Image (tube, rainbow, N blue to C red):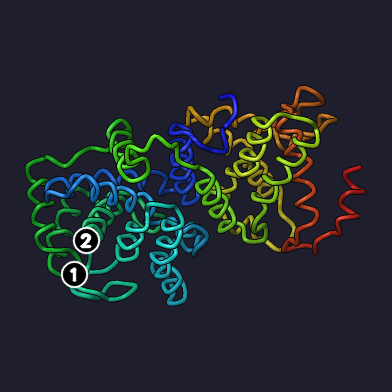
Amino acid sequence: MEGIAAFRGREFYQGLFDALVLGMGAAKGYLFDHGPRVAVQAQTLGERVGMSTHDLAEVFFGAVLADVGMIGLVEDEWEIPVPQLSPAARAEVQTHPERSAAAATSIPLLEGVGTLIRHHHEWWDGSGYPNGVAGEEIPLGARILRLADTVTALGEPRPHRPRRSSEEIRDAVAEGAGREFDPELAALWLELFDRDQLPTVQSAIYRQIRERAVEELIFRGDPVEPDGGLLLELLASLIDAKDPYTGGHSRRVARLAEAVSGAMGLDQAARERARAAGYLHDLGKLAVPSRVLRKPDALDDSEHARIRRHAEDGAELLGEIPVLQSFAPACRHHHERWDGRGYPDGLAGDAIPRIARILAVCDAYDAMTSARAYRPARTHFAAVTEIR
């Protein structure tokens, strides 16, 4: 891909959205494809109740972005199984609909989606959160998301419980009708279940739904290509939520990489690629447990190895998205060293991709001048001296 044209282009935007969804899944580990599964279930229900194309698109975005606010919250409680969340952890979890809604509405044209996301944990009887609204006061799209989210979650294993059987999920919907779920939506889901008409989640089905939704809400038939810069910002926010000690790191590396590329005399396309690579270089950190990223003490060998793997994890994630595959080498090799003693592949000198060499310097400078849990920030003079 030659140049990004200031992060514009349908394919680039779609690719960034896929990276966002995959990154969310990586951050939540065992919930890797939860959002797409919810999206397929919700789309089926929305179609059956006669939703417009626009409303179906909003439901799709609501499904895949509903849990973005969970990133960085109570991860230890999920990864180390506990029979029941503590009151403090429960209260933290209950903030995620509002956090998710704020993230969604930061993307232009998704303002309406924020309302659905905010209310996707409200219950029909008013006992849900965050606002305790009830019945038809809950937007229809949010009621659909509540049902689709629940049946999807029950069908997935969790650290503290196994996957529920199909009959157990059916019983949960029947019992929750009129309490957790809109009774008419619950009856519709039960009818589809009994007739074996609920869709199985296939990547092709999900991609079709995604393309329709993005075309409807983002592109709207407009010949002007959408700006992907805000999606890059949102991806950076996810990484910051996972590792708050490096808050703003990806943005700063992106700006530095663009500036260094310019100082090297590279053309506009190369500068834009360097900036985008700066946003994406730490994507693999979303898969690293927060307790490792935030550990204030010295890391043990296994924890060091887990953090070092973020370069490979990020490259693998980008490699799954055709339009972003060209960024995978920069992501994989930004911790290589000129003398060959870096990781993951021990490349040396000119064998390291140029964009990765640029990121290595910018990444090192920002790391040295940022505070960490285990040390204070170094001065600009000290960091520049180290780099020289």
| 104 with respect to 383 (left or right) | left
Q: Residue at x 71, y 29 (%)?
A: 267
Q: What type is the residue that disc 1 sits on?
A: Trp
Residue 274 percent across, percent down from the top left: 67, 36
Q: CA distance from mark 2 to mark 1?
A: 8 Å
The quarter of the image holding the C terminus is top right
The quarter of the image holding the N terminus is top right
**Mark sitting earlier along the chain (2/1):** 1
Residue 374 percent across, percent down from the top left: 76, 62
Q: Which mark is residue 303?
A: none
Identify the image quadrant of residue 218.
top left
Residue 317 percent across, percent down from the top left: 52, 36
Question: For the view shown, which residue lies furthest in the front direction?
Answer: 223
Q: What type is the residue that disc 2 sits on?
A: Arg
111 or 294: nearer the viewer: 111
- Is the residue marked by circle 2 packed among few (<14), some (14-19), or many (20+) residues within 10 Å? many
The residue at which mark 1 appears reads as: 124
Residue 364 percent across, percent down from the top left: 78, 46
The residue at which mark 2 appears reads as: 143
Q: Are marks 2 and 1 in contact (CB under 8 Å)?
A: yes
Q: Please determine whether, in this image, residue 334 is positioned above or below residue 241.
A: above
Q: Secondary structure at mark 1?
A: loop
| 283 with respect to 245 (left or right) | left
Q: Residue at x 72, y 63 (%)?
A: 373
Q: Residue at x 19, y 54 (%)?
A: 168
| 75 with respect to 217 (left or right) | right
Q: Secondary structure at mark 2?
A: helix
| 119 with respect to 272 (left or right) | left
Q: Residue at x 79, y 41 (%)?
A: 361
- Is the residue marked by circle 1 packed among few (<14), some (14-19), or many (20+) residues within 10 Å? many
